[in-house]
Amino acid sequence: MGKLASILSFVILFSFEMVFSQETDSIRKYSLKFQLTSIYQYQPAFHSPYSGTNSLIPTEEKALSLTSTLFLDVPLWKGATATFNPEMSGGEGLSQAKGLGGFPNGETFRIGDTKPVVYVARMLLQQEFQFKNNKSLQLVFGKFGLSDYFDGNTYSHDPRTQFLNWSLMANGAWDYAANTRGYTVGFYGNYQFDTWQIRTALVAEPTYANGPNVAFSFKDSNALNIEIEKKITFKNNYTSIIKILGFRNTAGMGNYNEANANFITTPDIKTTRENGRTKYGIGLNADYSHGDYWGLFARMSFNDGKNETWAFTEIDRSASIGINLKGKMWNRKDDFAGVAIVANGLSKSHEEYQKLGGNGFMIGDGTLNYGTEKIAEVFYSFLIPKTHFTISPDYQFAINPAYNKDRGPVQFLALRFHTEF
């Protein structure tokens, strides 16, 4: 971890210098932000009569992850901004981020090398147009994450400050186009009128399942996403936001039914891959804010589950619900807590593929006694007085990990350290 500590120290010192120079020089109009998140996670041993290639390791395990990010926004002309976002990540997830559909740490990637790596997360150009009668248009082109703009939720979206579980930071069945680290390249547009918004994106897909590189082709490799949002304001300015998301992915996916029908020992989805295959899906997302005291959220999502999971995680059905409690209720205005439950499932053909011993890029126990994967999570985030630092203990309890009744239940305990300015 010596190299990681050295790089981290440099990033922090550089960030303080840049922020200070921004504040003292009124000529500069750029915006610079910084965040650092480190998560320590512990998993006790759990019941497991057997394990497969992609199983969660049943013995006691510990893991540490870290990300550090700079966000630089530079105004160009009226309404136009260039964004450059270098990021560093290091460490690892439990079992190399495999073994569940709803993996317990959203700050980890399925990358074998645990050494710290610096890379460009986002590099984009944004143009905004303001019209009369509370109307606006936003256009974005470049490298970004689809979850930057779609499926946002006030209480369940960011594993750096909110719930850690993958299936709570986004609609679980939304197999959103991204490379291994969560980013893609393409075009995004958002039109806002009064309390409505409609947004769309056309972006590149990974060149292979969960791959590090993306490619765009109108015929064989792209992802189309469309989302409609409505904001509702109730009495006393309590608010609710409702979103409906639709997506269609096109990539060289394998087909579960073909893999199940054509195998000698165990099915292999890779042998059935064919250019131009599609995956369709839909997601519902809603939250309600009761002033400065508490809020609720819920999500439901579904994809057709016929072809291979390609980018996000191996979930074909998902539903979640939760509550956020704000510290103002107990005289800690900067603290907050969350409690949520989520249930994940597979399509019939995907279930059969796992039962026959097939592996995806994230799950595979060698066989399967199918059951819905159920996960509960609770966390508390408290601000260290007179600082920008928060500490968040987190607990998760998973039944039927990777949809397998024969394994588990599993517990995950975590401590998250986060700062941003």
Image (tube, rainbow, N blue to C red):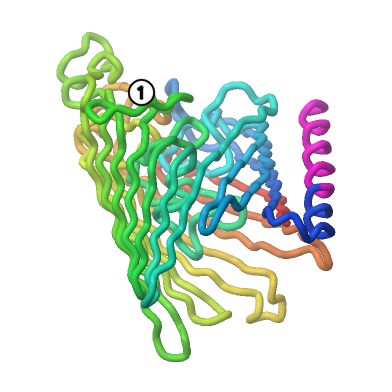
Q: Is residue 406 above or below residue 364?
A: below
Q: Which three-letter amino acid code belongs to the residue tagged 1? A: Asn
Quarter of the figure that contains the N terminus: top right
Give the magenta-colored segment's residue range. Answer: 1-17
Residues 245 and 294: in front is: 245
Residue with the most extreme front position: 77
Q: Position of residue 242 (x, y in %)?
A: 34, 68
Tell me the residue at 47%/86% (across/down). 237
Q: Is residue 173 visible?
A: yes
Q: Determine if the magenta segment contains residue 16.
A: yes
Image-based side of 356 in relation to 340, left or right: left
Residues 406 and 228: in front is: 228
Q: Which residue is identified by label 1?
A: 359
Q: Position of residue 113 (x, y in %)?
A: 62, 22
Q: Position of residue 208 (x, y in %)?
A: 37, 22
The answer to which quarter of the image holds residue 177 is: top left
Tell me the residue at 43%/78% (across/down). 239
